[in-house]
Image (spheres, rainbow, N blue to C red):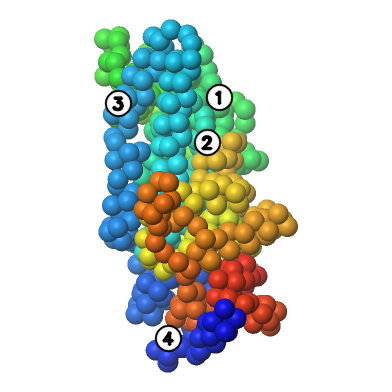
Amino acid sequence: MRSLAACLLVLAALPVLADDAALPKEDAYWLNRVTFGADSATLASFRDLGKRRFLDRQLHPSGDGLPAAIQARIAGFDAVKTPVTVLMAQVRDQAQVIKAMPDGDAKQEARKAQQKQGNEYAQQAQSAVLLEAIYDENQLREQLVWFWLNHFSVFRDKGRVRWLLADYTQNTIRPHALGKFRDLVMATLKSPAMLEYLDNAQNARDKINENYARELMELHTLGVGSGYTQADVQALAHILTGVGVNFDGQPRRIRRDLQPYYLQEGVFEFNPNRHDFSDQVLLGHTIKGGGFDEVEKAVDLIVNQPACATFVSTGLAKYFVADDPPPALIEAMAKTFRHTDGDIAQVMKTMLTSKYFTASLGKRYKDPTQFLVSAMRLAYDGKPVENPRPLVNWVQQLGQAPFGRITPDGWPLASSEWTSSGQVAKRFEIARSIGSGANHLFDLNDDGSQHRGGFPQLTTPTYYATIDPFLGPKTRDALSQATSQQEWNTYLLSSPEFNYR
C-alpha cells in the first residue's frame, strides 16, 4: 500500500506538457475569480479566446451552457418541470383534502406527507442552483444568479415558499441576472415567492402591511441611510396594496369599474379590490392613484435614485472585490449604472476591468458556496453527478444553504464572516469527502446500494496551469507528506491557496 501511494505521489509530481503551461499568475487568479473556479473547459475557452473575448462572452452569454446530462437532470425535477400554477393547484387541493379529514393520526400523517413533499421540492430547487453553478459554462452569470438570490433573499420554510423556489430561481432571477436592474426588481416584485415571504400578499387598503415596502427600499434598492423616511415606507406600502397572489385558482369578483385594473400572470395578481387608489408622495414625488402603473412608476423612481446605483454597486463590489471596496471603484460602477439605465453587465464590466479588481486577486477568502463549487469543478471536471443531495447537505453544513437565511438580509458578503475555526474544520471534512470519493455523488439509486465513481485525480492540466505554480512552501510541504492520492487531494482542497481566490 505504501509503495502504491508513493507511486501515485510521484505521478502527481510529474511536469505537465508544454501545451499545458501555467497561466501567468494574474491570469490564473483572474480566471478563478470571474468563474467559480477553473475546470478544463473554461481553461480551454480562456486560452482560445483570450481574456477580453472570454470576458465578453461571460458578460453576454448565449443560451444555456449546461451539459446535456445535467440539463436533463434538472429538467426532470418535479419542482422545475411542473408549472407553478399547476404546482400550487396541487398544494391547494391537498390542503383541502387534509382540512376535510377528521382529526386524528391519519390527518397528522397527511400533513407530514405534504410538508415532506414541500421539503423535497425545496431540496430540488437547491440542487438545481448548485448543479448549474458547478456545470454551466456561463460562470459569471451563475455567480450573479447566486448573488441576486442572496440579495433578493427568500426563506424556504416560510409559508408556501418551498414550493415556489424553483420558479423563483429559473423564471425570476436567472433571466435577469445580467440584464437591467429595473427589470430584475420588477420580476422579484411579481414573484409569488417574494410576495409570500415578505407578506405583501396580505397587504390591502384596509390592512396595510409594510414588510415588503420596507425591505424593497432598505435591502433591495436604496440601503439604510440613503435618505428615505418612514413616511416613504408607508407611501410605498399603500402603492403596493393589491399586489399579491392567487393560489386558490378561483376568479375574483371585481367591481365593474375596477375590472380594467385587474392583472394576473400565473399565480401573481394585482387585485384592485384590495388596492388603495389614493395619491401618494414617495421620495418627494407625487404618484397619482391609477392601479398597477403606480407600482411601475414607484419602481422607476426608486431605481433611478443615485443612492440605488451606489447601493447596488457596493454590494457587487463587496462580493467580487473586497469587504471594504475602494470608494473610487464604487463611484465608477455607480456612474456606469446611472448612464446605462442600470445595465448589470456594463456595471460588471466596469468592475472587472478596473485596477482595483486586479489588485484584489488572490485576496478574497471563498465563501462556502464558492469553496464547494470550485472544489467540485476541479475534482470532477464536468463529470455529471448522479445524486446532488450531498451537495445540498455540504453547503448546509457550511452554513450557507440557498434559501436558508431566515432574515431577508441574505448571507453575509464579507470574507471575514467565513473564516472561523469551525468553518475551516468543516471544510476539511468536506474536502476529504470530495477528495477521497467517500461520498454518494454517484449513487445510481436512493438507497446507495449501486454506485460508481472512485476518488478523483486533482493533478490535472487545470491544476498545473492555475494552482500548482502558486503554492507556497508550507502547502508544498504538507502535500509532500500525504501518504495517498486521496490524502493529497484533501490537503490541496483544504489549503489556504485553494481557499482564496
Name the residue carrying label 3.
Answer: 264
Q: Earlier in the sequence, mark 3 or mark 2?
A: 2
Q: Nearer the viewer, mark 2 or mark 1?
A: 2
Q: Residue at x 60, y 81 (%)?
A: 2
Which of the 4 image quarters holds residue 228?
top right
- Which part of the image, by quadrant, shows the N terminus? bottom right
Q: Are marks 4 and 2 in contact (CB under 8 Å)?
A: no
State the CA–CA distance, disc 4 to disc 1.
57 Å
Q: Are marks 4 and 1 in contact (CB under 8 Å)?
A: no
Secondary structure at badge 4 equals helix
Q: Nearer the viewer, mark 4 or mark 3?
A: 4
Q: Nearer the viewer, mark 3 or mark 2?
A: 2
- Amino acid carrying label 4: it is Asp
In-image side of 207 versus 57 (left or right): right
Q: Residue at x 43, y 51 (%)?
A: 448
Q: Earlier in the sequence, mark 1 or mark 3?
A: 1
Label of residue 155 in the image: 2
Q: Residues within 10 Å of mark 3 (few under 14, many from 20)?
A: few
Q: Residues within 10 Å of mark 1 (few under 14, many from 20)?
A: many
Q: Earlier in the sequence, mark 2 or mark 1?
A: 2
Q: Earlier in the sequence, mark 4 or mark 1?
A: 4
State the CA–CA distance, disc 2 to disc 1.
18 Å
State the CA–CA distance, disc 4 to disc 3.
55 Å
x and y, in percent, of residue 332 in the image: 54, 61
- Amino acid carrying label 2: it is Phe
Q: Earlier in the sequence, mark 4 or mark 2?
A: 4
- Amino acid carrying label 3: it is Gln
Name the residue carrying label 4.
Answer: 20
x and y, in percent, of residue 333 in the image: 52, 59
Q: Residues within 10 Å of mark 4 (few under 14, many from 20)?
A: some
Res 443 seen here: yes
x and y, in percent, of residue 144 in the image: 46, 54
